[in-house]
């Protein structure tokens, strides 16, 4: 199955009763990239009172990891609303950071939930996405001359060559989009390569 990820970063700004909410969405692959992105937002808006965030890693239908933070706002009024927006958008490998400049007027718990939800919704509405194909891994046994042919074919199909072992023949693993498996089998048959059947 494929899923959508951010194609580029997005930023929007939203004002509620004099408080400014600056929302940023960015693709992140793991927790370390999420931390880098959060630190960048803090550096770009150092005077903001709060930097609330949520991320969703992996396929949004079955996320590998999800996390959120209220960053000093009342519990459940910022991170959770941002995460709720992410969970309903069908986009994975994504983080939203909402930086708030307090305008002097308290919004109350309900007002904060609505404000952070709206801020996250707006940046998602502006976000361009692209499809990420999930890769499947297959073992391939080829002759030495076939390695360069296989490398070229994989490059043209968005595949990756790994775990290469040289003996009388070359044994390797290829990671390719699921949609390319049939084509891999066809190419292998034409070159006399061996692709073992999955156990």
Image (cartoon, rainbow, N blue to C red):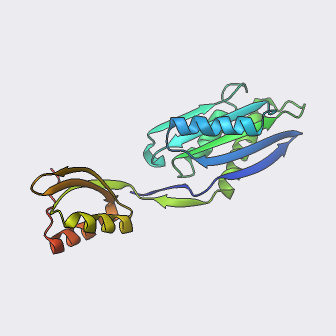
Q: Residue at x 30, y 63 (%)?
A: 151
* Residue 87 vertical placement versus 173 (above, below): above
Q: Which residue is drawn at 84% across and 45% down?
A: 15
* Residue 187 vertical placement versus 173 (above, below): below
The answer to whether one can see residue 81 in this image is: no
Image label count: 0
Q: Where is residue 198 in the image (x, y as percent from the top left)?
A: 17, 53
Viewer-nearest residue: 145 or 74: 145
Where the N terminus falls, by quadrant?
Answer: bottom left
Q: Which residue is drawn at 39% across and 62% down?
A: 158
Residue 70, quarter of the rendered image? top right
Q: Is residue 130 found left or right of 98 in the rendered image?
A: left
Q: Position of residue 164 (x, y in %)?
A: 23, 51
Q: Where is residue 114 in the image (x, y as percent from the top left)?
A: 74, 40
Residue 127, quarter of the rendered image? bottom right
Q: Where is residue 176 in the image (x, y as percent from the top left)?
A: 33, 59
Q: Is residue 139 found left or right of 103 in the rendered image?
A: left
The answer to whether one can see residue 186 in this image is: yes
Q: Which residue is drawn at 89% across and 39% down?
A: 18
* Residue 106 vertical placement versus 159 (above, below): above
């Amino acid at each position: 199955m494929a899923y959508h990820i951010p194609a580029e970063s997005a930023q929007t700004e939203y004002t509620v009763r004099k408080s400014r909410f600056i929302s940023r969405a960015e693709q992140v692959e793991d927790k370390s990239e999420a931390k880098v992105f959060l630190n960048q937002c803090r550096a770009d808006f150092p005077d903001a009172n709060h930097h609330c965030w949520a991320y969703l890693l992996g396929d949004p239908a079955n996320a590998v990891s999800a996390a959120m933070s209220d960053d000093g706002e009342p519990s459940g009024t910022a991170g959770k609303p941002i995460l709720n927006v992410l969970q309903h958008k069908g986009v994975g490998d994504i983080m939203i950071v909402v930086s708030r400049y307090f305008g002097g007027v308290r919004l109350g718990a309900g007002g904060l939930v609505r404000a952070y939800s709206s801020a996250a919704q707006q940046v998602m509405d502006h976000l361009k996405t692209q499809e990420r194909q999930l890769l499947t891994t297959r073992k391939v046994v080829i002759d030495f001359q076939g390695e360069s042919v296989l490398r070229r074919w994989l490059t043209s199909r968005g595949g990756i060559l790994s775990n290469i072992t040289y003996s009388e023949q070359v044994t390797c693993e290829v990671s390719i989009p699921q949609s390319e498996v049939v084509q891999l089998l066809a190419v292998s048959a034409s070159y006399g390569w061996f692709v073992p059947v999955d156990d």
